[in-house]
Structures are given as C-alpha cells and as structure tokens.
C-alpha cells in the first residue's frame, strides 16, 4: 500500500495547487479518494467525526446489489438457453448473461463517470461518489438486449437532467437511475416493452417467449409460473429485479448497516399489499375484474420491479422523505400507487418507476407538512402548560 501511496503522490504533483495542471486536479483526486481515506479535515464550521462517509455508503449499496446482479446474469442466460436446449449448465448460463450485461455496466460507468469528471473540472469541485450506485443500477433495470448506444444516451440524460441540472450529488430531486429508465421507456418504447425484449435473443428464436408476468396479466393471458419461481426469480424480467429473495437479502444488508430506511421498505410493501387486497375484493362486491385485479395480493409483491424499486430506489436518501413520519407516508404511497398504476394502465403494467418518481417530487411536501404538524403540536402543548400555570 505504501508503494501505491508513493506512486499516487508522484502522479498528483503536476496537478497540485499552483502547478500547470491544477485545473484537472479533481479527476486525479477522485482516484486517490477511491483507494485511500482522505487525509484532510475540516478547518472551520460545524462538523462531526464519523467513520462513515459517502464513499462507504455507496460501496455498501453496491455490495447489497451484487447478489441480485450475479443472479440476473445467470437468469438472463438461463431464460434464453433453456428455450433452445434441454440442459443448461450454471457457468454456461452465467457466461451468456455476463456477455450481455457487463458491456452495459462498462458503458454506464464510462459515460456517466466521464460526465461527472467533466462537471467536476468545470465547476472546480471534487468528484462525488454518488454515481457508483447509479452507474450499476441503470443497466440492472434495463432489458438484457437493449442496444448499448441507448444505454449511453439514457445515462447522458439521467446525469445531465436528473442530477447535474440540480447541482449534482445530494441536490437532485429525482432518482437518477429511474430518470434514465423513464427516458429510455418513453424515447424508445419498442425496445423497452413488448413480448420479446426481456429474454436475450428472443426475437431470433421462435420458441422463446420473453413476455413478463405483468405483461401476460395485462393482456389477460394466464401465468404459468409458480409462486416459488416468482419469488426466486426464475422468470423473464429486467436484469436484476426478478429475484425477490435476493432483493430482500440486499435489503437486510442495507437495514443492518442503516444505509437504507427500514420504514420506507416496510411501508412500501404494506401500501402495495393493501392496494392489491382492495382490488382482490372487487369480485366479492359484484365488480368484474381482470387477470391483474384477480391476481393474488401476495403475488403482486414478488413480481415485476416492485421489491427492487422499494428496496434500492425508494430508499435513496437524497430523493426520499427525510422525517421519520414522512418516511412511513412516502413508502406507503409508493407501494399504493405502484399497484394502482400497474392495474389501471394495461399499456404500462409495471408502475413502480412512475410511483417512485411521483413521490420523489412530493417528498419535500410530505416533510414540510410533517414538520408543520410537529410545530403546531408543540405550540399547543406550550399554550396548555401556560394556561395551567
């Protein structure tokens, strides 16, 4: 480690203050802070001493995503190979999926970090670690065969419009990864929806059916997958959102390390379950439903991107509600609206993306009214004490 430290110090010399390449120092410092803990401390103003910084928070989220990512690689290969051959080896499936997904990750990080570095140099501030998570989330919520140039364009839109336009990391009001997904969905709908985009090479093999469970239900088609398959993730879908089991494993890590809010996660699932139960009750009230409304409430929780969105995107500390009561309200409404959108809009049965983006916008409003309610309660308490006195 000492040798690496010495080499980095030598590389940084031309970029130090007063030197010719001082303007490009943020790009070099980003590599330094990624490998080593910064040796600088605050000199004035209020500050705290803590072992947790933004870099460690982002790395924790990345570690929580790894199980779902690896499974997504395997499942992506398995969904294709199982349609054209009788036996599928683990490494064979993993290799095929990795050959599709790793290039998407490289493009996402290459384009996104390139823009981040450019903004850091232009504005004269250090490179933030926030894109470590966003750069991985974006390819994980895309179809496995989406063209790489579409991934790049979506990343550019997300970083420019969803993040840097508001001032960069910590200032954005929308989740950048979902901003990329929303842009790709509305700009290139034929690549983001349909019956063949969720399985690798599905359009090249007649036997392959790449329609998701939500897509089948929206078209009033029967679902042939068992609840166990849905929970484990042996179904078509976005790269790393199919396995609810591994998503919940990542949720445990986020909750244990206090990186993700358990209140948002729990309330999100409660809101989704309640809305699904409401629709399940329609037939008993004499209202004719469809395949989506008649789909068992607990199955709504384990299909589509609901679990993945609630755990890894609704809990984004920047765009989520900040107050304790606000987190309960925020998560509950996300789950409620997610199921409502997927049922009421057959053209877009996956509603978690729009639900989270909608509540991202209203999160500050929720916090405002929660704070105002607390202020009124305290004023009332003070006035009662004065009256008694």
Image (cartoon, rainbow, N blue to C red):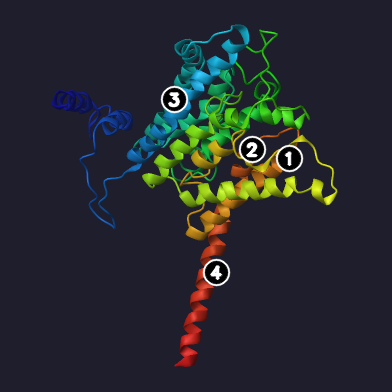
Taking the spot 55% from the left edge, 38% from the top edge, the residue there is 307
Foreground tag (3 vs 4): 4
State which quadrant residue 350 falls in: top right
Of mark 2 and mark 3, the one earlier in the sequence is 3
Q: Which residue is mark 1?
A: 343
State which quadrant residue 217 falls in: top right
Q: Which residue is mark 4?
A: 373
Residue 105 in the figure: left or right of residue 351: left
Foreground tag (1 vs 4): 1
* Secondary structure category for the residue under label 1: helix
**Within 10 Å of the Cα at label 3, are there few (<14), some (14-19), or many (20+) other Cα atoms?**
many
List the single residue furthest toward the bottom. Answer: 389
Residue 237 in the figure: left or right of residue 170: right
Of mark 2 and mark 4, the one earlier in the sequence is 2
Of mark 1 and mark 4, the one earlier in the sequence is 1
Q: Position of residue 380 (x, y in %)?
A: 52, 80
* Secondary structure category for the residue under label 3: helix
Taking the spot 30% from the left edge, 31% from the top edge, the residue there is 34
Q: CA distance from mark 2 to mark 4?
A: 36 Å
Q: Position of residue 288 (x, y in %)?
A: 84, 43
Of mark 1 and mark 3, the one earlier in the sequence is 3
Q: How many marks?
A: 4
Q: CA distance from mark 1 to mark 3?
A: 35 Å
Q: Which residue is mark 3?
A: 109
Q: Position of residue 83 (x, y in %)?
A: 62, 11
* Secondary structure category for the residue under label 2: helix
Q: Is residue 52 above or below residue 374?
A: above
Q: Quadrant of the C terminus?
A: bottom left
Q: Which residue is mark 2?
A: 299
Residue 320 seen from this side: no
Q: CA distance from mark 1 to mark 4?
A: 34 Å
Q: CA distance from mark 2 to mark 3?
A: 34 Å
């Amino acid at each position: 480690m000492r040798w690496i430290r010495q080499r980095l110090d030598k590389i940084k010399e031309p970029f130090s203050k007063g030197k010719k390449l001082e303007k490009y120092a943020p790009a070099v410092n980003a590599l330094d802070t990624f490998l080593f803990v910064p040796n600088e401390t605050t000199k004035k103003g209020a500050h705290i001493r803590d072992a947790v910084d933004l870099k460690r928070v982002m790395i924790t989220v990345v570690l929580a995503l790894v199980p779902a990512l690896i499974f997504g690689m395997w499942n992506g290969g398995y969904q294709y190979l199982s349609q054209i051959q009788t036996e599928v080896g683990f490494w064979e499936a993993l290799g095929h999926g990795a050959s599709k997904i790793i290039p998407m990750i490289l493009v996402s990080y290459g384009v996104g970090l390139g823009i981040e570095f450019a903004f850091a140099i232009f504005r004269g501030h250090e490179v933030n670690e926030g894109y470590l998570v966003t750069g991985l989330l974006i390819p994980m919520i895309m179809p496995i065969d989406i063209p790489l140039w579409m991934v790049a364009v979506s990343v550019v839109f997300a970083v420019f419009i969803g993040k840097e336009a508001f001032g960069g990391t910590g200032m954005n009001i929308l989740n950048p990864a979902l901003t990329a997904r929303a842009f790709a969905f509305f700009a290139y709908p034929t690549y983001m929806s349909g019956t063949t985009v969720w399985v690798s090479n599905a359009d090249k093999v007649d036997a392959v059916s790449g329609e998701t469970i939500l897509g089948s239900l929206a078209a009033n088609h029967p679902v042939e997958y068992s609840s166990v398959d849905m929970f484990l993730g042996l179904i078509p879908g976005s790269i790393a959102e199919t396995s609810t089991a591994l998503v919940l494993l990542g949720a445990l890590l986020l909750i244990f390390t206090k990186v993700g809010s358990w209140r948002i996660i729990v309330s999100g699932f409660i809101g989704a379950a309640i809305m699904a139960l409401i629709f399940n009750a329609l037939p008993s009230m004499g209202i004719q439903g469809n395949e989506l409304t008649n789909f068992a409430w607990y199955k709504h929780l384990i299909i589509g991107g609901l679990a993945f969105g609630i755990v890894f995107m609704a809990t984004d500390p920047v765009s989520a509600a900040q107050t304790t009561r606000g987190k309960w309200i925020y998560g509950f409404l996300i789950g409620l609206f997610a199921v409502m959108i997927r049922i009421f809009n057959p053209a877009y049965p996956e509603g978690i993306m729009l639900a989270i983006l909608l509540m991202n916008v209203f999160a500050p409003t929720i916090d405002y009214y929660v704070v105002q309610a607390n202020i009124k309660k305290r004023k009332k308490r003070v006035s009662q004490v004065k009256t008694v006195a």
